[in-house]
Amino acid sequence: MQRKLGKVGLPYVSYRTFRNFLELLNEGMPARIDRSVWGPRYSGTSGQQLMTALKNLDLIDDVGVPLRALEELVVSVGAERRNYLKIILKDKYKPIFEIDLLRATRSQFNEAFRYFGINEGVLSKCQLFFIQACQDAGIELSAYILARRHGLSSRKKSEKAMASRQSAPQKSDKLEINEAVISKILEKYPDFDPSWDPEVQKAWMDGMVKLYEGLKSEDKK
């Protein structure tokens, strides 16, 4: 069995934040990356997580000076960028790439990440960053690894659908009541007559508008 590593830092910032920051740097690489660079765009928490990710991936040094790997990654595009990103990932996540990522189960994936000794509280965030980075780099992962990534959103969709179904009868009942009210009011409301005086026609139209506006406000409650 592979020897467990000492505690090693892994990126756990949102991958979208990381990628967007690369695009920002493409506008001009600063001599040092610090709060004055990312502060106007990201919160303190996101910014600190971003700095941690850059350091953990060996893209900046301890004081924030960009390293060559970051400069190459930022200026590259297309297949070249995917290749640079793949090199960075394979260097940083060596224990992960020792398993067959095309066939690995979720348990194997979790075990490989635990070799880094990272905190359980950020484990899922570290894994999500890795998964999305691999997809950006064109590295294929097994369906078992990807299943959890979609599991949460699928569960939320199911919960939302269930809530929608539960509220549907109430909305249907309210709709039937409104329709009954409309029918009764219209029975007593005179049919529009073009021969009426303009003032009478206007009063009739105003009455109809108020009626339907009142019903719409009831539907929103």
Image (tube, helix red, strand yellow):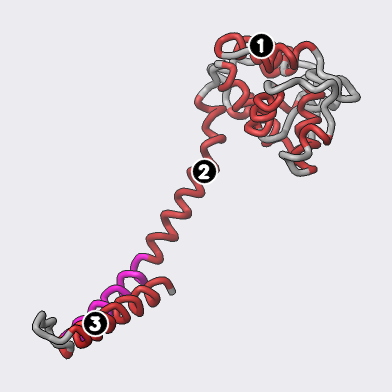
N-terminal-most mark, 1 or 3: 1
Residue 144 placement, left or right of 69: left
Number of disc labels: 3
Q: Which residues are magenta?
A: 168-186
Q: Residue at x 78, y 11 (%)?
A: 68
Report the mark closest to the observer, 1 or 3. Answer: 3
Q: Position of residue 198 (x, y in %)?
A: 19, 83
Disc 3: CA contacts within 10 A as few (<14), some (14-19) or many (>=20): few
Mark 1 nearby-residue class (10 Å; few <14, some 14–19, many ≥20)? some
Work out whether residue 63 or residue 195 is closer to the camera in this orientation and state it.
195
Q: Nearer the viewer, mark 2 or mark 1?
A: 1
Q: Residue 14 at what x, y percent from top left?
A: 67, 35
Could you tell which of marks 2 and 3 lies nearer the N-terminus? 2
CB of mark 2 within 8 Å of CB of mark 3? Answer: no
**Label 1: element kind:** helix
- Percent from the top left, x then y, of residue 35? 83, 35
Q: Element under label 2? A: helix
- Identify the residue at horizontal 12%, vertical 83% (top origin): 191
Residue at 57 percent across and 25 percent down: it is: 105
Nearer to us in this view, 83 or 9: 83
- Residue at the front extreme of this rendering: 198
Q: Examine the structure image and report whether residue 118 is included in the region drawn in magenta.
A: no
- The span from disc 2 to disc 3 (Cα, nearest Å) is 52 Å
- Residue at which label 2 appears: 153
CA distance for labels 2 and 1? 30 Å
Q: Residue most toward the bottom? A: 188
Q: Provide the residue designation for mark 3.
A: 202
Give the numbered dot on residue 103: none
Give residue 84's mark.
1
In which quadrant of the rendered image does the C terminus lie? bottom left
- Cα distance in 3D space between marks 1 and 3: 71 Å
